[in-house]
Amino acid sequence: MPKVMRSGLLAIGVLAALVGAAQGVPVQAEPGPAGHLDPRLPVAERVEDLLGRMSLDDKLGQMTQPERRYITPEEVTRYRIGSVLSGGGSAPTPNTPERWADMYDTFQRAALAGPLRVPLLYGVDAVHGHNTVVGATIFPHNIGLGATRSPALVREIGAATAREMAGTGMDWNFAPCVCVARDDRWGRTYESFGEVPELPAKMTTIIDGLQGDDLGGATSVLATAKHFVGDGGTADGDDRGDAKISEAELREVHLPPFRAAVERGVGSVMVSYSSWNGLKMHQNRYLITDVLKGELGFTGFVVSDYNGIDEIDGRPGFTRDEVAAAVNAGIDMVMVPIEWRRFIDYLREAVRDGDVPMSRIDDANRRILAKKVELGLFERPMADRAYLETVGGAEHRELARRAVARSQVLLKNDGVLPLDAEDKIFVAGGAAHDIGVQSGGWTITWQGEPGPITPGTTILEGIRGAAAAVDYDADGGGVDDSYDAAIAVVGEKPYAEHHGDLTGDMGLDAGDLKTIERLREAGVPVVVVLVSGRPLDIADELPGWDALLAAWLPGTEGAGVADVLFGEAEPTGRLPVTWMRDSAQQPINRGDGKTPLFPFGYGLTYG
């Protein structure tokens, strides 16, 4: 760093210190030579230099992550905040890539105005592309990517997501979810790559794509393996429930993907809301500190889930005891979106009373600060707007279309597929012409919603681009025997965690079934394209369908579905989960002795 620039940084630091003192915030009287700002020094040396300059309040701020709507830039400076996040659907107005970059830079300038010039990390749930940004490329959800069986493709998707994030300044992704989904009633099933540990473990290549070969690369973003551990194994698929399983099963089924993520150098790990045999993960020192950090050798930092510490004692809100329990368990950064000031006060009291040792605070800060140094945030803290043009760009959308095609799983085909481009096609179903439905949850908003919520190509538009003659009616009105085939695009409405849990029926809704029946009554071959985040109960209806294609939640590039329907791409997807014969079989998984409708790994081809 040039001498003049470093002198300027010190001057800014002294000015900020004076401002902080006037506001009654404890600061260092004289920071001295800023060794932590020297990129020539080793990471560990820079971190130790910085730790030696930090007050307790500096350190507590680094461990605190508020939500953007509940903190101002001035408060970021005053409280030395280490990270800010956008919760699901939390976006600037207007929701454009440029406005995201402006917002990021505003918060980052506030962090750099502190006396020690420590940059912040900005975290987002970019779980299938940069999915909260209108206009970004939305890739298939993980269940579809698991069906591709392609770690190389998933790595490409991680790199593309990182480029789009870099343009908007976002430097921390709360992804990938490496859970092993063992019960399809779980509302996060689609966030899993599959039901057996080796499949999510293989797909940790997305971490390589996100972080890059060098964590300090121009488009590197910090990846997060979540949710540690056992969230996919809770009883009855309860999203925040209890995994009532032995340690042997926990280690055999749920731990391997985290081991793979750690081996790939994942920068952070997020703790699960769920419990293991009655003990909330947010206070499980054995699993977080002894197993993750000790046994697996994880050197990054551990972050809580959104308000995750609130649930330790089973009552609303968090207490001082819960704060101490979470930090002592090994959580380094705490996601406290609203009550972040109270968190800081409680943690300060716990340290001063000896309930949380200073060594634990220093360990957390070392881990957080090391990743900031490795990411190059001290040297390149602002959004790199050169990458704004990649957001929703043609190259990324073509990659997404290719991923969609490879994720399709052909489950039944009585000779009707592939369709011919010269065929006269009728299309029906509420999911046929709806970007929001085909993208699912975690798209623009937290739970997702139907409608034209972001630019893209619907499945109907993809079919129209592939065939010469296509008619459409959502309910199937107007179909007759003059058509060569009818395509019903049906399935689930958007949902995300917690709200997506199912406790009863797992079948298609009455409207979808009526639409399909109307097509059947016309006497033409019926192809059902199922848009869903998990297997649905369709065994009773399946004999009346000529073909069934599991499209999962493909995202914005619906033309990839049409590519398979019309033979431009071979159906090569394989089931990443076992397809139940009926919902009463749940949970059902490979090797459990139950007879499924379609086994794990099943998938037809045209060959």
Image (spheres, grey):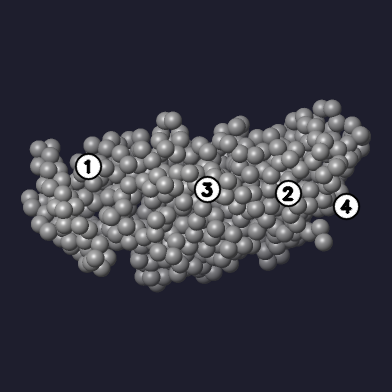
Q: Position of residue 61 (x, y in %)?
A: 24, 48
**Nearer the N terminus, badge 3 or badge 1?**
1
Residue of label 4: 415
Q: Position of residue 318 (x, y in %)?
A: 32, 43
Instruction: Report the amino acid beneath label 1.
Output: Thr
Q: Nearer the viewer, residue 209 or 539?
A: 209
Do the residues bearing badges 4 and 1 touch, measured as CB atoms within 8 Å? no
Q: Residues within 10 Å of mark 3 (few under 14, many from 20)?
A: many
Reply above or below: 137 against 198. above
* Residue at the spot of label 1: 77
Marks 4 and 2, how far apart in space? 17 Å
Q: Say which of 301 and 110 sits in front.
A: 110
Residue 563, label in figure:
2
Q: CA distance from mark 4 to mark 1?
A: 65 Å
Question: Which residue appears at 40% of the width and 51% of the height?
Answer: 172
Residue 540 lies left or right of residue 550; in this view the side is right
* Residue 287 percent coordinates (x, y): 40, 64
Query: Of helix, strand and loop, which one carries label 2?
Result: helix
Nearer the N terminus, badge 4 or badge 2? 4
Amino acid bearing label 2 = Asp
Q: Nearer the viewer, mark 2 or mark 1?
A: 2
Q: Residue at x 21, y 50 (%)?
A: 117
Find disc 3 in the rendering and name its residue. Answer: 129
